[in-house]
């Protein structure tokens, strides 16, 4: 009896090893669906482009205005419409075919980004802010449609892993887009900034040299007068 009781006790090490072996499989399982792979990859590219644009526009606004308040206004214009329009986005996705909503919202988002770049070329900040706000609202519609499509392309038991993969891809794409946008802006502006810094340094050197010469001339005049 005692031997039978001891024989039924599971080994905790084996149980933990089984969990460890199962976790990668659970994460890989949703990626076997071509539809989910296309959805996750497409949305990640969309997030990458959105935050690449935001980072570049932040650099442009600050360079053209030297105002942190204008940069904060740009970020508010980009982030507030998705929060306020979340209910509208859910209503649109609920009433219309989700795949079609996703496609058209991505096309509209690309159009607003192109319009924002045109506003930068024209130097129009009001038009830029309006287009960035519209891009935020359209992006929320695309996000809701993409999230609603996940249960349609994976099995029910794969849904938690699929949601996790989708969320990680979104956050990674946003971070990569922000870093790439900031790095691109710095790389593009570095020659101009270097020339401006050199010009300011030469001007300061000339002013300092002039001040030294004036002080020296004054001392000579005072010594001659004495």
Image (cartoon, rainbow, N blue to C red):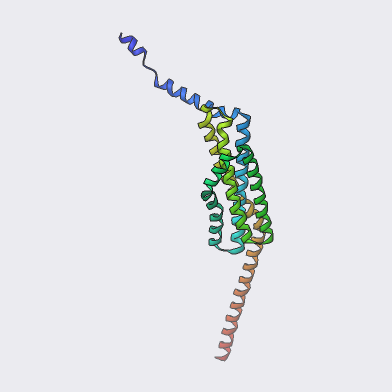
Which picture quadrant has residue 172? top right
List the single residue furthest toward the left.
2
Residue at image location 61% in from the left, 74% down from the top? 207
Task: Please state, as top left, top right, bottom left or bottom right, where the N terminus lies in the image.
Answer: top left
Where does the image place residue 102, in percent across and percent down from the top left? 62, 40
Nearer to us in this view, 196 or 207: 196
Residue at image location 63% in from the left, 71% down from the top? 203
Nearer to us in this view, 79 or 92: 92
In this picture, is 117 found above or below 101? below
Where does the image place residue 92, in percent across and percent down from the top left? 57, 43
Nearer to us in this view, 197 or 20: 20
Which picture quadrant has residue 16? top left
Task: Please state, as top left, top right, bottom left or bottom right, where the C terminus lies in the image.
Answer: bottom right
Residue at image location 63% in from the left, 59% down from the top? 127
Left or right: 8, with 226 as reference point: left
Where does the image place residue 173, in percent across and percent down from the top left? 58, 42
């Amino acid at each position: 009896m005692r031997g039978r009781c001891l024989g039924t006790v599971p080994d905790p090490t084996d149980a933990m090893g089984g969990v460890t072996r199962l976790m990668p499989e659970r994460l890989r399982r949703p990626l076997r669906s071509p539809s989910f792979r296309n959805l996750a990859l497409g949305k990640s590219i969309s997030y990458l482009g959105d935050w690449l644009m935001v980072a570049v526009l932040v650099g442009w606004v600050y360079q053209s205005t030297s105002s942190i308040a204008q940069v904060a206004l740009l970020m508010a214009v980009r982030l507030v419409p998705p929060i306020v329009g979340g209910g509208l986005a859910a209503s649109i996705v609920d009433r219309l075919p989700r795949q079609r909503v996703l496609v058209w919202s991505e096309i509209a988002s690309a159009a607003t980004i192109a319009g924002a770049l045109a506003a930068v070329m024209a130097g129009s900040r009001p038009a830029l802010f309006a287009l960035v706000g519209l891009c935020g609202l359209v992006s929320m519609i695309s996000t809701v449609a993409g999230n609603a499509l996940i249960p349609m392309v994976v099995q029910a038991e794969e849904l938690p892993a699929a949601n996790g993969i989708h969320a990680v891809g979104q956050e990674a794409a946003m971070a990569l887009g922000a870093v790439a946008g900031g790095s691109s802006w710095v790389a593009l502006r570095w020659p101009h900034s270097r020339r401006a810094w050199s010009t300011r340094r030469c001007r300061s050197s000339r002013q300092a040299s002039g001040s030294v010469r004036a002080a020296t001339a004054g001392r000579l005049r005072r010594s001659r007068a004495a």
